[in-house]
Image (tube, helix red, strand yellow):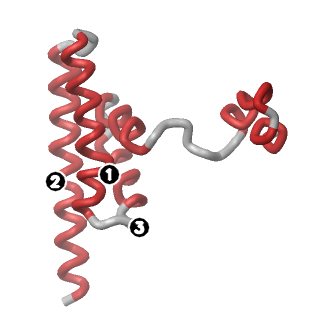
Amino acid sequence: LVVLGRHVPQFEFLDVLFGNEPVLEPHARLYQRLLAGDPDEATDHAEEMLEDKYLFEFYGQVAIPALLLGEQDRERGVMDDAQRRQLADSAMTLVANLDDSAQQEAEEEE
């Protein structure tokens, strides 16, 4: 069914439902995790990406675009104060977690 969904446009929904590809773009997935107040899963997601990217690339290509999604939601009025705080707190935790990981890796390399 997944193969059918990948190759026949009318059945594309089957690939989305049963395939193993993430449906959301990386920055949207990160935004969803931060907004849900799940910085640990956001950190796991980031660390997976950091296997192929440098930290500054992750921030530029994923983290900042994720925060821009939050800003867009705030401007549209679809995010309340509690959600803004949750997003900010989760983002700060993510940054701290990634800083800790980077420091541990630097210490291991020495």
N-terminal of the pair, mark 3 or mark 1, is 1
Residue at 35% x, 65% y: name it.
53
Q: Amino acid at mark 1?
A: Thr
Horizontal relation, residue 32 to residue 63: left or right: right
Q: For the residue labelled by badge 3, is the local secondary structure a helix, a strand or a loop? A: loop
x, y percent for residue 56: 22, 60
Residue occupying the far top of the picture: 77
Q: Amino acid at mark 3?
A: Asp
Q: Amino acid at mark 2?
A: Ala
Disc marking residue 56 = none
Residue at 23% x, 21% y: name it.
83
Q: For the residue labelled by badge 1, is the local secondary structure a helix, a strand or a loop? A: helix
Horizontal relation, residue 36 to residue 102: left or right: right
Q: Calculate the distance from the C-alpha at mark 1 to the C-alpha at mark 2.
A: 10 Å
Q: How many numbered marks have been drawn onto this rendered protein structure?
A: 3
Q: Calculate the distance from the C-alpha at mark 2 to the C-alpha at mark 3.
A: 20 Å
Circles 3 and 1: CB atoms closer than 8 Å: no
x, y percent for residue 4: 84, 38
Task: Work out whether 70 lies above or below 42.
Answer: above
Q: Calculate the distance from the C-alpha at mark 3 to the C-alpha at mark 1.
A: 15 Å
Residue at 24% x, 12% y: name it.
76
Dot 2 alpha-carbon crowd within 10 angstroms: few under 14, some 14 to 19, many 20 or more: few
N-terminal of the pair, mark 1 or mark 2, is 1
Q: Nearer the viewer, residue 20 or 97?
A: 20
Disc marking residue 52 = 3
Q: Quadrant of the C terminus?
A: bottom left
The nearer-to-camera label among 2 and 3 is 3
N-terminal of the pair, mark 2 or mark 3, is 3
Task: Work out whether 30 lies above or below 85.
Answer: below
Disc marking residue 43 = 1
Q: Which residue is mark 2?
A: 96
x, y percent for residue 47: 36, 60
